[in-house]
Amino acid sequence: MSSNPAELRPATADRAALVVSEVRPNLPRTLIALDFDGTLAPIVSRPADARLIDGADQVLRLLVARGASVAIITGRDAETVLDLSGLADLPGLAVAGLYGAQVWRGGRLATTPPPPELTRARSALPELVRAVSSELWIEDKGLSLVVHARGVDEPDAAIDALRPSVEKLAQSLSSEGGLEVHAGRQVLELRLAGFDKGRALREFVDAFGDASDRQLLYAGDDVGDLPAFAVVQQLREAGRRAWAVGVGSTEVTWMPADDSRVDAVVDGPAGLLSLLRGLLGG
Ligand SMILES: [Mg+2]
């Protein structure tokens, strides 16, 4: 990895162009699976204010009109993302919410029932959070609890300070590992074990069909997307046509511009939008 971003820029643009040129000829047999926050929607201070980046709605509709299938895989509640994105009427759209603990398709939502330890975590978490900072706040997603540090002084330090006590809580409540703790972009999340974006993506790929001409494009911006990037890699090793795109930004320090876990790194949701637009042929 070079420390000089200017040196990487041409190579990075080439990688994105290569992905477009490989995916485009077979667009009607392509599943385009996308994360929401930081990928389709710019990161905002209040999660409720997140919206699709301008132009994304039109581009996604054109991709579907050309025969592509679109799925969203998110850590958020599926219905929240449908509301925020305005994509509920996008033909064929599937949404995996809460890392796959929910799947929405054709207006129907299938949800995993919440385990009792989640109810106990809901009661215990506020005190642990207050002990670290009064500025941290909890978002209750029903099947997961998310502590947000965005806007807090030194957010990463606050998450690091909170993490041990939340991990201890998860272990004490679920001796069989029913709850897991995950850190993301200025968040710490307590969620049901066994769900991640890799598993959710695999289920969508299986539902999409395994004919050899079927292909996959996945894009995401956060560490929660790494299991999905790994699935892309596994599919490719198994001979399938699959590509992963990282959505980078100055805030995404864990993903360098030449990250080898993905086929290309684009610059924020605007960079992804221009890649998707490229699939339409110009
Ligand atoms: Mg994201």
Image (spheres, grey):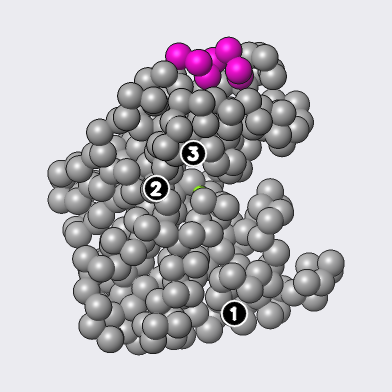
Label 3 sits on what residue type? Glu
Check contact, mark 1 vs mark 2: CB within 8 A: no
Residue 127 located within the stretch drawn in magenta = yes
Q: Position of residue 235 (x, y in %)?
A: 40, 76
Q: Residue at x 41, y 71 (%)?
A: 217
The quadrant in which residue 111 appears is top left
User: How many residues crowd around disc 3 within 10 Å: few (fewer than 14), some, or many (20 or more)?
Assistant: some
Q: CA distance from mark 2 to mark 3?
A: 8 Å
Q: Quadrant of the C terminus?
A: bottom left
- Secondary structure beneath dot 1 equals helix
Q: CA distance from mark 1 to mark 2?
A: 33 Å
- Secondary structure beneath dot 3 equals strand
Q: Earlier in the sequence, mark 1 or mark 2?
A: 1
- Residue that mark 3 sits on: 180
Q: Which mark is residue 194?
A: 2
The CB of the residue at mark 1 lies under 8 Å from ligand 1: no
Question: How many numbered markers are drawn?
Answer: 3
Does residue 214 show up?
Answer: yes
- Residue that mark 1 sits on: 15
Q: Is residue 106 left or right of residue 197?
A: left
In this view, 150 is above or below 23: above
Q: CA distance from mark 1 to mark 3?
A: 35 Å
Label 1 sits on what residue type? Arg
Image: magenta residue range: 123-129
Near-viewer residue (67 or 77): 77
Q: Is residue 273 left or right of residue 260?
A: left
Q: Residue at x 69, y 18 (%)?
A: 133
Q: Earlier in the sequence, mark 2 or mark 3?
A: 3
Q: Position of residue 109 (x, y in %)?
A: 19, 42
Q: Residue at x 45, y 62 (%)?
A: 228
Label 2 sits on what residue type? Gly
In this rendering, which labeled residue sits more in front, label 1 or label 2? 2
